[in-house]
Amino acid sequence: MANPDVKGIELRKWARKTFSLLRDPPKSSMSAWLSTTVATECTQTAYKTLHRAHAPTLESKLLQWIRKCEEWSVPIVSGPTMRVKAKQIRDQMLARNDHDEHSQLLRLKFSNGWLHRFKTRFGLKSRRVYGEAASARERSVDEGRRNLLTITAGYDKRDIYNLDETAYFYCATPSKAVCTKGMPGRKKVKKWITVAVTSNADGSSKWPLLLIGTAKKPRCFGPATVSDMGVVYAASKKG
């Protein structure tokens, strides 16, 4: 379909035949596909049979949502989120009842097979979001380990304690997303809770987790106290 003179109605008929749809896709869907230049990339020639979509309008709306996420560089699209969004679209369509896919929508189970066929029809794959990558220098890590072994050589294992500090970025976006092409990473939202894990070398003494947040009394705890949850909590401006 590389002919620029082809008419819209002909293109819709071609899409119906090529992608094994039950009916011609709406004009809005064709415009969305063409604007992202994937109209011909969706066909998977490696498969002998391309199963037809039982609810093409729903799949069209789901595809538009995925492309919007790509456009906004929001890497939230995954198998579970696609199922949740598809169910939301189905419920909205059933409530409006302005289509002829009622019986097909009621039969949809959004199984692994449905998800696989949907991704195959439109060339969707899980791709890593690129950008803002960093790695630690292995040489510095090795030197630090050797120095630590020298310092602790004269102590019993039960008297050697290690505290590991890490940050839990609770607003972080996924590093992978289902999309049609590579997606640039967005500036990361660096809201975090500091988590400290402490234990001695032989594992006979394990201290409760230390959590450090910014709120003195986090609302997420509700009526429960920190001691009820078996952790130690502290607050600081940076978390």
Image (cartoon, rainbow, N blue to C red):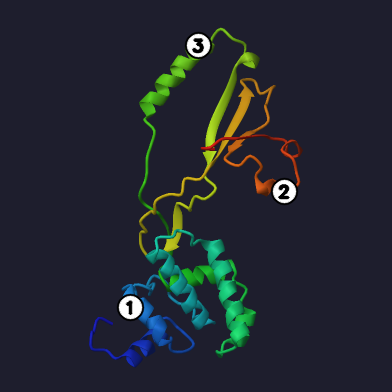
Mark 3–mark 1 Cα distance, whole angstroms, equals: 65 Å
Q: Mark 3 and mark 2 in contact (Cβ < 8 Å)?
A: no
Tell me the residue at 45%/70% (across/down): 120
- Mark 1, other Cα within 10 Å: few <14 / some 14–19 / many ≥20: few
Q: Is residue 174 left or right of residue 3?
A: right
On screen, residue 205 versus residue 165, left or right, reads right
Task: Tell me residue 193's x, y (percent).
Answer: 56, 40
Could one spot residue 71 in this view of the protein? yes
> Which-is-in-front pick, marks 1 and 2?
2
Classify residue 38 by image quadrant. Answer: bottom left
The residue closer to the viewer here, 202 or 217, is 217
Foreground pick, 236 / 142:
236
Q: Residues within 10 Å of mark 3 (few under 14, many from 20)?
A: few
- What label does residue 76 carry, if any? none
Secondary structure state at the residue bearing disc 1:
helix
Query: Residue at position x 55%, y 72% from top?
Result: 86
Callout 3: helix, strand or loop?
Answer: helix
Name the residue type under label 2: Gly
Tell me what residue is drawn at x 36 percent, y 81 percent.
31
